[in-house]
Image (spheres, grey):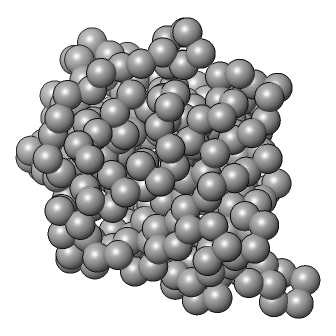
Amino acid sequence: MPQRFMIAAVAACLALPALAQTALAQTALAQTECPAISLGPADGLPVYEGACLIGGDEQAFAAFALPTGPAVKDGDVWRGEREERLEGRYLRRLYAAPEGRSPLEVVRNYRDALTAAGFTVLFECSGADCGRNEAMGSRILWTQDRRLETLGDLSRYAFTGLSDDHYLAARSADGSTSLGLYVARNNFKRFPETFERAILHLDIVQTRAMEARMIDAAAMRTALDDTGRIALDNIYFDFGTSVLTPESAPALDEMAKLLFDAPEIGVYIVGHTDNVGSFEANLVLSRERAEAVVEALAARGIARDRIVPAGVAALSPVASNATETGRQMNRRVEMVMR
């Protein structure tokens, strides 16, 4: 069976072990182009040839219980008979395979590609061996509170009337990346785009400790007095956007406190990116992210004439953009004394 994968490199996604690259022959989803979703696939993660991305999300730090055994009912709660509690950067992706590809073929291709890249299979199962009545999908991985809504109902009901389900859990050779792959056939006629297609759902965790990067107002002022600038690493945005996440609130509160306590100073809020993508697009994104921080500070009562936004894209790196670690360091917001 030929392997049907492509490798897609996307900024700000997980750094996973590289797999052998083959060409992608993009296929139509119900006679239309694949829908455009800004998330994109994870850097280095295999994508089944011709599969359409129909949903996804990601979080800088989250917890996930990776099933490493079949679905079982524990009182009123379904769970994996064995589970591994993981914490770290967490990403989910949902794909519709091309017409005519069986769930078995899809999961076997993933297994072969992952093991070739050094991943170890922790657990795999099919049908009733995964738990009765497709419980792995309907009771654990695709419960109502976990349904992706990226494309509305098309994503939300991608796993409906399931049949022929398969599951695989695997871990990279260095132990840093764990994933769970669930594949099943969708039998919901309401959406011809996904009806009778093999649907793929991936949970991916890059294990890491939560970074203790909270800096209080006093430390910010000391850095501004000493160096004229401070990098605010605990300002977070939704992937590829200028939308601040709720996790940014503590840092924004401390920035506002600093400016309230020192009414005599003004600052530039400067957005930085890595060098992935066009300079023009990164320049716009970096400026919009700086403006989002300014808006958040203004909402906290800081006068706008004291906080000036600016975006410099990748013009002022603090690390090499040749590695994912360096790119993460370069994606930042700084406060600079005026």
Q: Is residue 20 left or right of residue 153?
A: left
Q: Residue at x 45, y 79 (%)?
A: 123
Quick one: quadrant of the C terminus? top left
Q: Is residue 300 visible?
A: no
Residue 129 position, x and y percent, is 61, 77
Q: Find residue 130 and report its image quarter.
A: bottom right
Q: Is residue 199 above or below residue 49?
A: below
Q: Which residue, as the protein is rendered here, is positioned at the far right?
A: 76
Q: Find residue 330 and report its image quarter.
A: top left
| Along the viewing direction, whichever of 193 and 210 lies nearer the viewer | 193
Q: Residue at x 23, y 66 (%)?
A: 115
| Along the viewing direction, whichever of 118 and 309 lies nearer the viewer | 118
| Along the viewing direction, whichever of 59 and 222 lies nearer the viewer | 59
Q: Is residue 262 left or right of residue 22?
A: right
Residue 62 position, x and y percent, is 55, 66
Residue 14 position, x and y percent, is 33, 53
Q: Is residue 80 above or below residue 194?
A: below
Q: Is residue 281 visible?
A: yes
Residue 67 position, x and y percent, is 57, 77
Q: Is residue 331 left or right of residue 294?
A: left
Q: Find residue 269 and report its image quarter.
A: top left
